[in-house]
Amino acid sequence: MTKQILLNAFDMNCAGHINHGLWTHPRDQSYRFNELNYWTDLAKTLERGLFDGLFIADIIGVYDVYQNNLDVTLKESVQLPSHDPMTLISGMAAVTTHLGFGVTVNLSYEQPYTLARRFASLDHLTQGRIGWNIVTGYLDSAERLFGRKTLAEHDLRYEQANEFLNVCYQYWEHSWQDDALRHDKTARIFTEPSKVHEVQHHGQFYQSQGVFQVSSSPQRTPVLFQAGASNAGMNFATTHAECIFIGGDTIAQVKQHVENIQQHLTKQGRARDEVKIFVGITVVTAETEQQAQDKFKEYQRYASPEAGLAHYSSSVGINLAQYDEHETIPYKKTNSIQSINKKFKSQSITPHQLKQQHQLGGRYPLFIGSGQQIAQQLIHFLDETGIDGFNLTRTVTPESYHDFIDWVIPELQQQGRYKTRYDAGTLRQKIFKQEPYLPAHHPAKQHALKKSDSYIK
Ligand SMILES: Cc1cc2nc3c(=O)[nH]c(=O)nc-3n(C[C@H](O)[C@H](O)[C@H](O)COP(=O)(O)O)c2cc1C
């Protein structure tokens, strides 16, 4: 059977997310991100397009590396101001039935207990449509906000993340049996005491003992998203994640990345089909190729490649403004995103060339064409690389979502490569066509209640 394409919208609770500068376009509405209606309308739009999910990025901290200040970031609204993504979910869940929500939360500034409680609460309220994009951060500016000077060492952050997850798994998978809630008014038993269990965790970074506050939710553990791409990041992602995001400019790069993931998965004893791999993309489309090209040129007039560079500087932890336009950017080891920084090791690239790659202000692969052409290109990309789906960034919003839904989705459907209706069930069931809970051999399950506890059927 041909593989169906999975699709998330990739957005952030701010004006300038990936494709910088486009908030200045007269038709762009992203400045309304502080209105709940903006988000509920978006959720309804995405459900009209049968998107699997809305994936919401987030950062803690600000982009202050470029020129060693915040000027470009503030003027161009490069993910600043930006608001807490979790606050959006209940509102959007209330106006949709099927759309999933992947929310980014940086665990470095959280405690496992409180974060696990928020996700479990949202899993209840969304009826099992919540996912967590696990990140550990890459900004020294965030550390300073928390009274520290610099980021913890890159690989150590993943060690801490590993333990963080293991504590969360105990809350989600161990504390409450499925049938603990009785709601028996006559017997005056809301919860059956023998079916609620204590968690005991004594680790290197975290200590916790007691009962979790939230009863077992539709998925128990939210769908786990991750984007680690360094060696440590890849080990972490292939141990825990169910959905992995990757970057990559070319089919060859992405294909290699997918093969690398496959090797790591094998090492972890997991099969390739236990994870779904997504690539971030930008699309400009219209009824005809000419109209799409015209639209791209129009958008380009509003884009800010320099703001893209300010974003890039913070991603790699290097002030790219210090180099002349045509000077090769030297490789420097930093504590930020290793997988992006390594571009300077493998390629000779100047600030001018980087800006040229940021034609719409963002660094994701750009597809321009009619709906039919885009559908063909996406199918080709997916089939050649072995990925499972795409994270679609926005350009002029909500216009670019409507364009994709109106022009590309019907073409994908016609080719039998995109669903024509949603499946029933939780986000995990929809994506994997399996059970609502994590599969039995996922590491979270070592914390699950035993068969005798009547939790596993
Ligand atoms: C598509 C994609 C989306 C990401 N979104 C976020 C995000 O919202 N917040 C964040 O702090 N990091 C984000 N990251 C960065 C990752 O969390 C991670 O730092 C990065 O992939 C590099 O991992 P590495 O240090 O293992 O190379 C994203 C990465 C990718 C590829």
Image (spheres, helix red, strand yellow):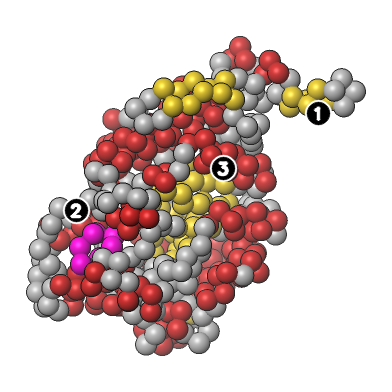
Image quadrant of residue 162? top left
| 416, 91: nearer the viewer | 91
Alpha-carbon span between mark 1 and mark 3: 23 Å
Residue type at mark 1 is His
Question: Residue 193: within the magenta?
Answer: no
What type is the residue that disc 2 sits on? Answer: Thr
Q: Which mark is residue 374?
A: none
**Residue at 22% over, 50% down:** 335
Residue 192 image position (x, y, % from top left): 73, 20
Crowd around label 1: few <14 · some 14–19 · many ≥20 (10 Å): few
The part of the chain drawn in magenta is 313-319
What residue is shown with label 2?
Answer: 334
Q: Is residue 211 above or below residue 165?
A: above
Say which label, 1 or 3, has the lower sequence index.
Answer: 3
Cβ atoms under marks 1 and 3 closer than 8 Å? no
What is the tally of numbered marks visible in this picture?
Answer: 3
Tell me residue 306's x, y (percent): 28, 77
Q: Which residue is mark 3?
A: 119
User: Secondary structure under badge 3?
Assistant: helix
Q: Earlier in the sequence, mark 2 or mark 1?
A: 1
Q: Residue furthest top?
A: 452
Quadrant the C terminus occupies: top right
Q: Please say if 362 is above or below 416.
A: below
Q: Nearer the viewer, residue 142 or 263?
A: 142
Element at label 1: strand
- In the picture shown, does residue 409 fall above or below 210? below
Disc nearer the start of the sequence (3/2): 3
Which residue position holds label 1? 183
Label 2 sits on a secondary structure element that is loop
